[in-house]
Amino acid sequence: MAFRPGIDVLTSPALDRVPGLVHGFGTRAFDLPSLRRFARVRGFALVLLEQVHSADVVLVRRPPRPGEPLRTADALATVRAGVLLAVKTADCLPVLLADPERRAVAAVHGGWRGTRSRILERTVDVLAARFGSRPRALLAAFGPCIGGGCYEVGADVRAEFAAAGLPLVPFRPAPGRPGAFLLDLVAANRAQLVRRGVPARRISASGPCTHCDARLRSFRRDRGRAGRLYSFIGFRPAGL
């Protein structure tokens, strides 16, 4: 991934090549007012969520009305041009999906709970069922999240993945910490996409670790002072 000049966001080279597609993974300098300005000056209607670490996907059929309450879920999907879908994170994994054939997009918030509940698999299923997307035609970009060498979890998290029938390959023992494990969110979610038929070559994941990179926000590092990172995707309105 590379920083887009003049804007404090990271972009995926693969998504950059899709005509009419706008996307990015914001740094700490790209706050919510920055996102709102970004959307407004480009003619987008911005859609956000009340995120609750679920596996629920909201279909966006129209721009939100003024004062309309946020929907409760952890993924957004649309085929409507001119709508900018956004999720917020601060160590969790943001995933942006694009279908160049159907011009469908999705934005996903993937923490360990959403990953355990297979939120990415669910999102691919929704894109296929509602918009006719073929998994092998999807492009996926993973944004910055806490890295597999920094994300320590307890044995209870590993047990929940096992109970859900998920592979335990993304877990490894935390050195010098009996009963603790390091979880690789990128590996766990990449496996979900591959299981749903998204080719590995169409999945990009090179974002820096939020815990290690001071340009990013990390709840594990900064706790209550962390703030949030904003990731977004959408096809440009007609004529723009």
Image: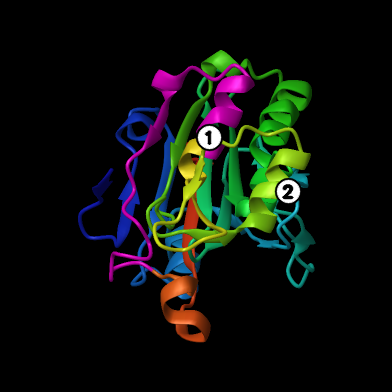
Question: Is residue 7 depicted above or below 31 in this figure?
Answer: above
Residue 204 found in image quarter: top left
In the image, 113: left or right of 100? right
User: Is residue 88 or residue 196 the one in the foreground?
Assistant: 196
User: Is residue 24 or residue 51 the one in the foreground?
Assistant: 51
* Residue 21 visible in the shown view: yes
In the image, 134: left or right of 13? right
Q: Is residue 202 magenta?
A: yes
Q: Which mark is residue 169?
A: 1
Q: Residue at x 30, y 34 (%)?
A: 13
Quarter of the figure that contains the C terminus: top left
Residue 125's spot in the image, x, y percent?
73, 27
Range covered by the magenta-colored residues:
188-216
Q: Residue at x 30, y 62 (%)?
A: 8
Q: Is residue 223 magenta?
A: no
Q: Earlier in the sequence, mark 1 or mark 2?
A: 2
Residue that badge 2 annotates: 160
Residue 31 found in image quarter: bottom left
In the image, 125: left or right of 142? right
Residue 154's spot in the image, x, y percent?
60, 60
